[in-house]
Image: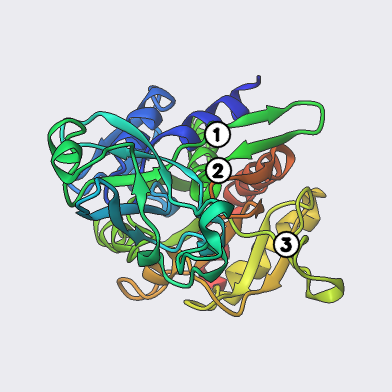
Amino acid sequence: MNKNVELITELADAFGPSGFEDEVVNTARRYTKELDVYEDHMRNFYMKPKNFSGKKLHVLLDAHSDEVGFMVHSVRPDGSLRFTNLGSPTLVTLASDKVRVRNDRGEFIPGIISSVSPHYAKTSSANAGAITQINQLSMDVGATSDKEAEEEFAITMGEPATFDTTCEYDEEHGLIFGKAFDCRVGCAAVITTLNRIKDMDLKVDVSGVLAVMEEFNAGGAQIAAQTVKPDLVICFEGCPADDTIASGSDIQTRLKHGPFLRHMDGSMISHPRFQKFALDTAKKYGIKWQAGVREGSGTNGMKYHVANQGIPTIVMGIPVRYAHSANGITAEEDFENAVELTVKILTELDENIFETF
């Protein structure tokens, strides 16, 4: 397994639903030992090369460290857990998914999201085909009463949970299977890019942040924008691929077709001149890329592009099939092309080009 895949898989396997990103930060620290790093009290994780001058045009590389997940709402008398969502997990796939619940002692407790056996489905209103709201589901850790759940399993209201999935790497086809690629594949891209440019003599200063809670309210990016005050932002995303659900010209995000640069989404219009510069750079260096117009969703870019006096912002998406579910697919070559394109953008950028934006 190469270093890129190792980094992606370790970050993706880390426990980190919105608001509980500590394990992701601890993983990131192991791969940023040659960078200057610090974190704030929200667990935003900031990184910069040691040659960061503070005197040049400042480009911030952003990715969000959280993943979609859950929080225990209450413990039912039968020992099952009512839960609510942190972010927007794919509702239709939840029944029978394995989860990990972090209990009050900091231990990870295995569990399953409830499903209904076919033996009872005909008489149960909770059969999987009728699920329309998350509160129709339960988590089951095997407790038989609320007392056992709370005393033996140490699970009470407010405990976080997420999917219990371990990454697998198909080396022959360059594919990675796992959870949380939105946006741990982006976190890996920020770290890899910073490590690649750390000794380069660029005309810009570059720093990075792994920002918390994008899936919840993008609050981490709002804090980072105020803290860093960058001149430009590149937001990495594990963007949902649509090549298995759309057809013809409606397909805009294909696996193994390079990073996806969106002209807009439901939360922002990418800075048109910065966007054109990025796409022109991809063409100049023959880097595989794709672009499109998203009609919904959003990224941390929503916070950056209206921060301070306005920050030119683009989104560098790495395609992920089945994002927000327990099992996704991403391609190593798309990751590598995203990093390579970002390095070339940083190499080409200078104050004169920025002034044209």
The answer to which of 213 and 35 lies nearer the viewer is 213
Q: Label 1: few (<14), some or many (≥20) within 10 Å?
A: many
Residue at which label 2 appears: 185
Question: What residue appears at the point 78 percent right and 75 percent down from the top-left corner?
Answer: 250
How far is disc 1 from disc 3 in space, using C-alphas?
20 Å
Mark 2 in CB contact with mark 1 (< 8 angstroms): yes
**Placement of 334 over or under 312, stated as above or below:** above
On the question of residue 237 being in view, the answer is: no
The dot on residue 357 is none
The answer to which of 209 and 267 lies nearer the viewer is 267
Question: What residue appears at the point 51 percent right and 36 percent down from the top-left corner?
Answer: 165
Question: What residue appears at the point 55 percent right and 73 percent down from the top-left corner?
Answer: 270
Q: Is residue 328 left or right of residue 187?
A: right
Q: Secondary structure at mark 1?
A: helix
On the question of residue 139 being in view, the answer is: yes
Query: Which of the two discs, 2 and 1, labels the residue nearer the N terminus?
Result: 1
Q: Position of residue 229 (x, y in %)?
A: 31, 60
Residue flagged by tag 3: what amino acid is it?
Answer: Thr
Residue at which label 1 appears: 8
Residue flagged by tag 2: what amino acid is it?
Answer: Val
Residue at which label 3 appears: 253
